[in-house]
Image: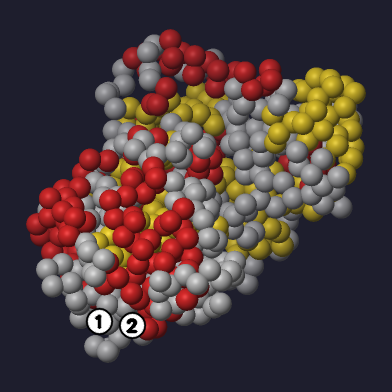
Amino acid sequence: MSVGAPKIAVTVAEVVEVNELIKRFRFVRTGGGVMPTFSGGSHIVVDMDDHGTRRLNPYSLMSDPADPSSYMISVRRDDQGRGGSLYMHRHVTPGLQMQIGHPVNLFPLDLRGRKHLLVAGGIGITPFIAQMAQLAARGERFELHYAARTRSLGAYMDDLQARYGDRVHLYLDDQGQTLDLKTLLAGQPFGTHLYVCGPKPMLNWVLSTAKAMGWPDGAVHSEEFLAPPVGKPFAVELATSGKTITVDGNQSLLEAIEKAGVDAPYLCRGGACGQCETDVLQCDGHLEHNDHWLTPEQKASNRKIMPCVSRFHGQKLVLDR
Amino acid sequence: MGLEFNTETFRDDFTFRNSPKAIRRFPFPFPEDSYMYSVNMEPHVPGPKGSVFEHMFDVDEHYLSEMRDRALVLKDDPLRCQSLPHMTLAGWDLLELIMEAKARDYPHWFELHKTGNRWTWINRPMEIEQTFTFLDESTLPYGPMEYITRQTQGDFTLQDQRDNTLWIDAGMVTTQADWSLDFDVGMSFNEWHAPVPLAHQMGVFERALKFLLKLQLGAPVRRFNWTMTVDPLLDTSPENYPKWGPSKATLTPDTVGRRQHLRVELQSLHRLPRSNAIAFPIRAYLIRFEELVSVPKWGRRLHRIIRDIHPDLATYKGFIRNRDMMVDYLAQFDDGQPTSPGWWPED
């Protein structure tokens, strides 16, 4: 569980194969009724029952925030991943009943922005689709720069271009098209906010370029969900609940805690939000910090861990949980 | 309908009174015989029938008189209501939250009819019927936050979330415990809480901010705050301090029971859907000592709390000057018997 609102029971209304890697899923409320209104940039956690294994994966909402009749997400299949996206691709079909969490926004628009400059790579386009719908409805100024490997992998490129015209700029790797980021950033009007969502190398490139060019931190926004990495199994002692559990190689520490029936808070399950932060009571060994929530000092202290993405190897780990 | 709402004043002749029913449902904020700061937040879920927690926004017998008082304050000082330009969307979120809650919880008083974005709002107690276009500011006589908070008891702030903190970027503040929206607007969470003593060292604000940044849609929370007010004045603002501050110096042992009021704020926090801002309603309830001691448990407990409170808190809450007089008065109602845990009036 997590602090907060109860889960929403939904039914899969539609599954669309967008391209060879991406499927789009539309959820409606089971038994009718509208979905909670949300803000562009929000994600939901989808609760999957993968043949007895519970998977909870976050996905950005891409539907129009003004349309409460349904929610839409796009899922990119990750053949090397732990199985959540494969489950969505192989087993989630129209009519299936599922549970989702309430929307949480860790990537909100800064509504003070006089212009919103959106930079997307690959599947990172999804939060921007909802944000652009919200911005367009309010008559706000925005511009999208969207890169993908090929036209066929560039999900929704045609659709976005048709809807927003010359506010959409596309870059295809196989055509040798690249974004001239420095020129783009140099030419922005005062009050522009920059948003980036995509694979890590792209994120680092955009963030470091903006920083080097003097963009204030408060005007630069990014979102990156980490998938929990696979690793070696390890044991962990949960002091508060008096349990010792084993974390499997393809299981996250958080998932192992939940499977043991211990209540642990979470929101993003991707190392970004800080909600699952847990005190480390004893650590004889090495914490593999994979989050981007804890500060370098906190990581070095061995006193905190983010169980959604981080792991351990060594003799003994005791958590306050 | 006229019988459901008091006709009373919160200024000049101060005719404000609590009915016996209002006394029984008063949100007495002390679950035990001592008081110190804490984050003390709990889910804002519906509480017992008839209590101030029954509905998301409590509408009580003081509704119409409080709205008249708010209009008077705004007439004298329009800056009590401010909304920075980027907060208009949060104002719409708040308008929707309040209209839907009131229409759901008090259908005999409020109605909301929607045809697409064309909405009709009926507020029977205030004799208002308004048709407008949701998200189109030009179709309302005021901005959305001002429009709905002129019809809703309690102060409101709207807090924008950026840079890992909250910013008090809009508000309607006419019933405040000596703080100023005009002074605080645009400040960050740590800036506007800077004057509070002790709590910073206790880490209260650090924990509270961390909690609030993660506040979830559909999962509002609430907490109490409290202070003391001489005479049932809603507008105890810094702007008007010269008008009400001196009244503390006119309290006597003969008048303390009648003029001294416990002022309780039922504060709730709601994540807003479109703007991702946080709405912070601060609903003030006043009760004179004479009314409060009619509940024996509360008389005993308030005596012990005021007697034992940390002097820094009594100073910050503005009653250190009259503390001894208050303790002397309340002592008559404390027979030394134990009190039951929790704040409900039952012994």
Residue at image location 31% in from the left, 36% down from the top: B187
- Is A86 drawn above or below residue B99 in the view shown? above
Q: Which mark is residue B105?
A: none
Residue B115 place in picture, x, y as percent: 35, 72
Residue located beneath label 2 in the image = B19
Q: Nearer the viewer, residue A155 or A278?
A: A278
- Is A55 drawn above or below residue A236 in the view shown? below
Q: Chain of mark 1?
A: B
Residue at image location 63% in from the left, 72% down from the top: A31
Q: Nearer the viewer, mark 1 or mark 2?
A: 2
Q: Earlier in the sequence, mark 1 or mark 2?
A: 1
Residue at image location 49% in from the left, 14% down from the top: A208
Please state if B107 lies on the left or on the right of B151 as rendered.
Answer: right
Residue A63 place in picture, x, y as percent: 51, 50
Secondary structure state at the residue bearing disc 1: loop
Characterize the local packing of mark 1: few (<14), some (14-19) or many (20 or more) Cα atoms within 10 angstroms.
some
Please state if A55 lies on the left or on the right of A203 as rendered.
Answer: right
Query: Badges 1 and 2: C-beta atoms under 8 Å apart?
Result: yes
Q: Quadrant of the C terminus of chain A?
A: top right
The kind of residue on which mark 2 rests is Ser
Residue at image location 81% in from the left, 25% down from the top: A283
Residue A155 place in picture, x, y as percent: 57, 37
Residue B290 place in picture, x, y as percent: 33, 74
Please state if B347 lies on the left or on the right of B315 as rendered.
Answer: right
Residue located beneath label 1 in the image = B6
Please state if A19 lies on the left or on the right of B213 as rendered.
Answer: right
The kind of residue on which mark 1 rests is Asn
Q: Is residue B156 visible?
A: no
